[in-house]
Amino acid sequence: MKCLILAAGYATRLYPLTENFPKPLLTVGEKTILDWLIDDVDTSGEVDEYIVISNHKFEKHFEEWSKTKKQKITVLDDGTSTNETRLGAVRDIEFAINTLSISDDMLVIAGDNLLDFSLTKFIQYAKSKGTSCIMCYFEPSIERLRKCGVAEVDENDRVIRLTEKPSEPKSNYACPPFYYYTKSDAMLVSKGIAEGCGTDAPGSYIAWLCAQTPVCAMEMPGKRYDIGNLESYEAVKKEYKGYAG
């Protein structure tokens, strides 16, 4: 299995901290955000390669960081240099699949979120379902739901519909940027783009995919920490204690 890490954003809301430095390499406690994610996923024993998708501006930072890791890490430069010219998450995923000729199951994760539980639980869940999968959690705030992906899920965990940033959310299940694609579903990314799925938010591909083939949702057994601005970063540095097994 490959682990694809989305790290090509410009984190403009964290300026000046990230004006010349990538958000996923900011430290929380004794590790960078990426270290927390990769060191956790690696305990599953399922991933044989980690692929970090960067923009051109920050690619050298990731290359230097990768030299400190024992895992096999490939850093991809998507060729963009500004927030205005970014490809968007789904096109970055397509870029990685095509550039590296990936033909495998894929764990696709944002490189700027932390969890207080192990992602190995999600990998195990996806393996048991045998489908592409997402994670979700109950979000009571309508305003927050309007700023994220929202899933409608049936009693068998099947995703009926996923909508990115809905003005009128149809459920309270918010979806963080952590996804599992089966090998066959990963091969459909270019088709999804050609048929008009959104390309900026990573959940846009799942929004298209769940209408084509079964996609299941695992309710998160813990908390997600989204580092979106300077205030949230300072809070995470104080609060985050790592993940439980």
Image (tube, helix red, strand yellow):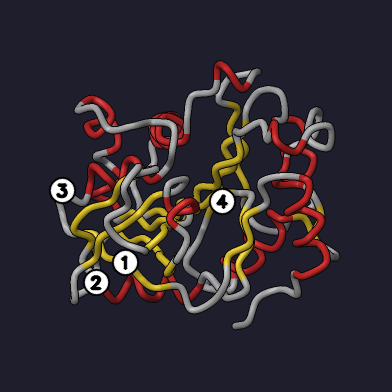
Residue 122 in view:
yes
Three-letter amino acid code of the residue under disc 1: Ala
**The N terminus is located in which quarter?**
bottom left
Q: Which residue is mark 4?
A: 50
Q: Residues within 10 Å of mark 4 (few under 14, many from 20)?
A: many
Q: Residue furthest bottom?
A: 245
Residue 99 location, quadrant:
top left
Q: Which residue is mark 3?
A: 211
Distance from Cα at disc 1 to Cα at disc 4? 23 Å
Label 3: element kind = loop
Residue 33 horizontal/vertical position (percent): 71, 55
Q: Which residue is mark 2?
A: 157
Q: Which residue is mark 1?
A: 217
Label 2: element kind = loop
Of the residues tagged 4 and 2, which is closer to the observer? 2
Q: Could you tell whether 130 is left or right of 178 in the image?
A: left
Which comes before the other along the chain, label 4 or label 2? 4
Q: Could you tell whether 142 is left or right of 127 in the image?
A: right
The total of numbered circles placed on residues is: 4
Looking at the image, do the residues carrying marks 2 and 1 touch, with CB atoms under 8 Å apart?
Answer: yes
Distance from Cα at disc 4 to Cα at disc 2? 28 Å
Looking at the image, do the residues carrying marks 4 and 2 touch, with CB atoms under 8 Å apart?
Answer: no
Image height check: is 74 above or below 119? above
Q: Residues within 10 Å of mark 1 (few under 14, many from 20)?
A: many
Label 4: element kind = strand
Three-letter amino acid code of the residue under disc 3: Ala
Could you tell me which residue is drawn at 68 percent across and 51 percent down? Answer: 227
